[in-house]
Amino acid sequence: MVGLLHDIDYQKYPEEHLRHARQMLQEAGFDEAFIHAVESHGWGLCTDVEPKCTMEKVLFTVDELTGFITACAYVRPSRSVLDLEVKSVRKKWGSAAFAAGVRRDVIEKGASLLGLPLDEVIGKTILALRTVAPEIGLQGIFANA
C-alpha cells in the first residue's frame, strides 16, 4: 500500500512534494508508521525523515531506480525490461546525460542502507519489474509474443 500511495501529493503539489502527504494520509486514517514510510522515501531530497525499516529503505532506493531502469528499457531495440540485464543498466550508469533527472547518488545510498551491492539491487529491481511488465508498458516487442 505504501508503494501505491508514496507520491500521494505529487500530482497536486509537484513543487511541494511530501509537504502535504502527512495531512492527506492522516485525513484518510493512515497510522504514523505508514506516514513515516511515505515521508522517508524523500529523505535528503524533500524531507528529513530517514528510512528505518527494510521496506522504507527499499522504497527510498527503488523510487529512483525504477525510473532509471525504465529509461534503459525504452532505449533498447526491444523496448522491454524482459530481456534487460544488469550489465546493460550499468553501461548507462556512468553517462550523466542519460536519464539526467535520476539521482544515482540516492540509489547508491539506498543500496548502502540495505547493505547490498548496487548490482544486486539493480538485478532484483529488474526481476520485480519483469513480473509487471505488461501492466507498466515494459513488455515492448514481446507484447504479442
Image: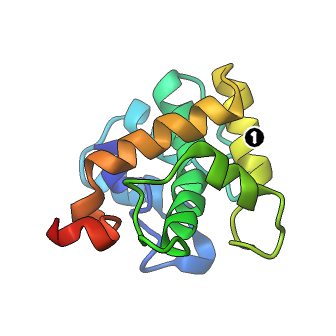
Question: Which residue appears at 53% of the width and 22% of the height?
Answer: 53
> Along the horizontal axis of the image, is 141 left or right of 52?
left
Q: For this rendering, which residue is in front, 57 or 145?
A: 145
> Along the horizontal axis of the image, is 134 left or right of 115?
left
Q: For this rendering, which residue is in front, 76 or 3?
A: 76
To which quarter of the image does residue 95 belong? Answer: bottom right
Q: Is 37 above or below relative to 114?
A: below
To which quarter of the image does residue 16 belong? Answer: bottom right
Image coords of residue 32 (percent x, y):
41, 34
Image coords of residue 60 (percent x, y):
58, 43
Asked if residue 36 shows in the view, the reply is no
Q: For this rendering, which residue is in front, 86 or 65?
A: 86
Image coords of residue 5 (percent x, y):
34, 54
Question: SS class of the residue under badge 1?
Answer: helix
Mark 1 crowd level (few <14, some 14–19, many ≥20, 10 Å Cα): some
Question: Which residue appears at 58% of the width and 41% of the height?
Answer: 122
Q: Which residue is mark 1?
A: 108
Quarter of the image for the C terminus: give it.
Answer: bottom left
